[in-house]
Amino acid sequence: MVQVADPIAACSDAILGCVQDSSNHYGVVLDSRVQTLTQTLSDCVVTVGTSTGSCNFDSTLQLVLDTTSAHTFNIIFPNVGAGTYTISVEAAVNTSATASGGTAIAGAAYGLGAMTAESVRLVHDFSF
């Protein structure tokens, strides 16, 4: 039996940061970076057969960065009974790049990390 920890177990389309893949499984986006660069150049108008026309070299650049980054994660398994358990961590990387009239290249990587599992007994549904 596989048990999914919170916050992933509580994911839905209404929660920001929860992402559903093509097999209807949810995941939580922990690190994300979106970079958008837009450039607009002015138009040149030239009349064919004459030496008239107008051209200026106005250029407008727009750079938008959107970054979300979390470096520590608490994943909780409520109501786990006694026994031996195997913990499996899945990580995925997704890159995409689009260009209109140019070239766009995207890349992503992740490296080694550390995981600590701690057993903590909390009182559940306690009342006086």
Image (cartoon, grey):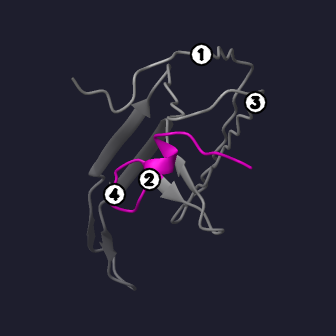
Q: Name the image quarter holding the C terminus.
A: top left
Q: Residue 19 location in percent, x, y?
A: 49, 55
Residue matched to label 3: 85
Magenta-colored span: 1-18
Question: Type of residue at label 2?
Answer: Cys
Measured Cα–Cα span from mark 4 to mark 3: 57 Å
Residue matched to label 4: 40
Q: Nearer the viewer, residue 38 or 86?
A: 86
Please tell me which residue is depicted at 45% across the width and 26% down the height of the picture.
70
User: Reading the chain from its start, which is encountered first: label 2 or label 3?
Assistant: 2
Disc 1 secondary structure class = loop
Please tell me which residue is depicted at 40% across the width and 34% down the height of the picture.
68
Instruction: Check if mark 2's residue and mark 3's residue have beta carbons within 8 Å.
Output: no
Q: Residues within 10 Å of mark 2 (few under 14, many from 20)?
A: some
Q: Which is in the foreground here, disc 4 or disc 3?
A: 3
Q: Answer with left or right where residue 110 lies relative to residue 42.
A: right
Measured Cα–Cα span from mark 1 to mark 2: 24 Å
Q: Answer with left or right where residue 111 lies relative to residue 69.
A: right
Q: Which is in the foreground here, disc 1 or disc 2?
A: 1
User: Reading the chain from its start, which is encountered first: label 2 or label 4?
Assistant: 2
Please tell me which residue is depicted at 30% across the width and 52% down the height of the picture.
57
User: Reading the chain from its start, which is encountered first: label 1 or label 4?
Assistant: 4
Question: Type of residue at label 3?
Answer: Tyr
Identify whether 40 is placed above or below 37: below
Instruction: Check if mark 4's residue and mark 3's residue have beta carbons within 8 Å.
Output: no
Please tell me which residue is depicted at 37% across the width and 38% down the height of the picture.
65
Residue matched to label 1: 119
Residue matched to label 2: 11
Residue at the extreme left of the image, as rendered? 128
Q: Answer with left or right where residue 38 lies relative to residue 22.
A: left
Disc 2 secondary structure class = loop
